[in-house]
Image (cartoon, rainbow, N blue to C red):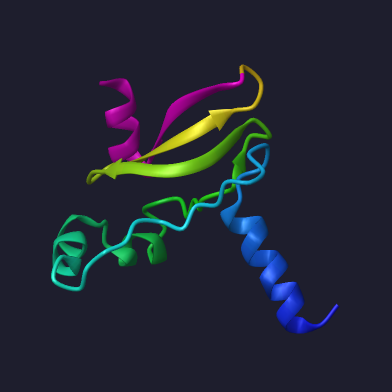
Amino acid sequence: MSEPEAAAGLETAITTPSGRIGTTDHGDFVDSEDEYEFDEVAEDPEQYARGSYYPTYIGETLADRYRIDHKLGHGGFSVVWMAYDMLSKTDVALKIMVPGDVGEHEYHI
């Protein structure tokens, strides 16, 4: 398999959630005039580099059970993802908190 063919297969594997053949997530179209609004509401990428946020990605499976489908939102202490629970066959929201005392405090609230 050539490198471009392998890359095309990888892109398909990443953007096509397992179990949903025939549907591809192309993301949302963002007009360049609206792009600044997304930068203002997106979490700081540096938080991932410092280890504050767990680097989850679309299509990833957590705990051999939850397939990550879409990011719902974020806050100072967590990121919330829409996921598919492959055991119960339902959509769920997963809140992944930052490690340490701050995330632990939010967990107990």
Judged from this view, the residue extending furthest toward the top is 88
Residue 99 appears in the figure: no
Magenta-highlighted residues: 89-109
Is residue 94 shown above or below 99? above
Where residue 81 sits in the image (x, y, percent)? 41, 39
Q: Nearer the viewer, residue 53 or 4?
A: 4
**Quadrant (top left, top right, bottom left, bottom right) of the N terminus:** bottom right
Name the residue: 28% across, 39% down.
102
Q: Is residue 20 left or right of residue 84?
A: right
The image quarter in which residue 84 lies: top right
Q: Nearer the viewer, residue 84 or 103?
A: 84
Where residue 9 sits in the image (x, y, percent)? 72, 66
Give the number of marks: 0
Name the residue: 20% across, 65% down.
39
Q: Is residue 33 left or right of residue 71?
A: left
Name the residue: 62% across, 42% down.
61
Q: Is residue 65 within the magenta segment? A: no
Where residue 105 sits in the image (x, y, percent)? 28, 30
Q: Nearer the viewer, residue 57 or 29?
A: 29
Residue 8 appears in the figure: yes
**Quadrant (top left, top right, bottom left, bottom right) of the C terminus:** top left
Where residue 82 sits in the image (x, y, percent)? 43, 35
Name the residue: 42% across, 58% down.
51
Judged from this view, the residue extending furthest toward the right is 1
Q: Is residue 86 left or right of residue 55?
A: right
